[in-house]
Image (spheres, rainbow, N blue to C red):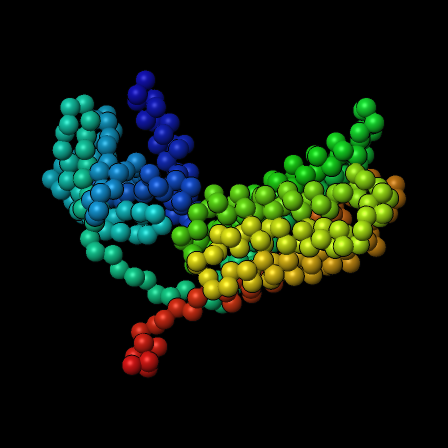
Amino acid sequence: MLRVVDRLQTLLVNPVAGRLLRTPLHDLLSERVALLTLTGRRSGATIRLPVQYEQHGDTLTVLSRPSRRWWRNLNEGAPVRIALRGQDRHGHATVARAGSAVVVTIRLVAEQCGPPADRGRLWRRWTKAVTLGEIAGFAVPAVVAAQVAAAEWTWLGIGPLLQGAAIVMAGAVEGAILGLAQAYVLRAALPVIPTRAWVRATAAGAVIAWTVGLLPVVLGERILRWPPAVLVLLGLTLLGSMGLLQARLLRGQVRKAWRWAVASAGSWLVALGAFALVTTPLWQEGQPGWLVVAIGVLGGAVMAATAAALTGAAIVCLLPVPVSGASVAKAR
């Protein structure tokens, strides 16, 4: 049975975990799992596998079952490489037996700093990743909205409320996908911000924004009788909720993190305007559902590219300026 489990782990789990550990989203696993690279003692082949570890200072401890064979390449001690919490480290591994377990001890060598991040490259990566992430994310509420609009949701007379709830839940999925896309790029520059926290903040902001945006659908013309100050506050909440929640995570990492909330709100205001310019002339009464979805996705693509480019410029401006050796020499 253990051989079957080992085989399934090697074929199915290890490739997915290994690829994830090499991306900026590694922190979804890397608190306990690292990607170990070693050389086959006889074959000379490169062996890569994710391993669970415990760290004490510059020493990692990895436990394995004797039925696993990879550790045998380290019997006499061997150099290894390890992707540890997003950083490539070198070390020397030794093996010992402890009852029914194999203990692999890896002593890490001194860490070296890499070159400062290229801001232009960061903006391009952000724009590309966030555009694709928002297109994929926005497709979820677009499809859901088209489906619930076509359905006769009149059960107990609360159709609009059920429609709104379905779209808000789809909006949470959109926020999670967008948060993952943003975190994929952002963590290359700010690795201290956890992916899970950023995704939660983005999804929560999306839920708030969709809830506010759907109030006219649920309440109808009654919302027009609300005081203008309340309507203005709702508009600010719609635009600023996501950026405000994300800015809380940026505090202490960038100067004046509140500017991210302002920049994000402004970017989404422009992006929503672009969405309206594209979709308003195209959407007509009585259109088939597939056409409604197609127009929504087209508008979402324009909105996504606009928001991605503007928020990318904002995050690049907010990041601290890296200090190079040449700059330090001039300062001296």
- Which quarter of the rendered picture does the C terminus lie within? bottom left
- Which quarter of the rendered picture does the N terminus lie within? top left
Question: Which residue lies at the image location 34% right of the left edge and 72% below the top edge?
Answer: 324
Above or below: residue 321 compared with residue 175: below
Residue 20 image offset from top left, x and y in percent: 42, 43
Above or below: residue 66 compared with residue 22: above
Does 92 sit left or right of 225 as displayed?
A: left
Question: Which residue lies at the image location 31% right of the left edge and 47% below the top edge?
Answer: 84
Does 261 sit left or right of 167 as displayed?
A: left
Give the residue at the far right of this rendering. 285
Q: Nearer the viewer, residue 157 or 126?
A: 157
Question: Which residue lies at the image location 46% right of the left edge and 62% below the top edge?
Answer: 254
Residue 262 image offset from top left, x and y in percent: 61, 61
Residue 69 image offset from top left, x and y in percent: 23, 31
Residue 195 image offset from top left, x and y in percent: 46, 46
Does 275 sit left or right of 256 as displayed?
A: right
Question: Which residue lies at the image location 79% right of the left edge and 38% below the top edge?
Answer: 218
Dividing the picture into quadrants, the one containing residue 13 is top left
Camera sees residue 229: yes
Dividing the picture into quadrants, the one containing residue 153 is top right
Camera sees residue 140: no
Dividing the picture into quadrants, the one containing residue 162 is top right
Give the residue at the far left of this rendering. 76
Q: Nearer the viewer, residue 19 or 11?
A: 19
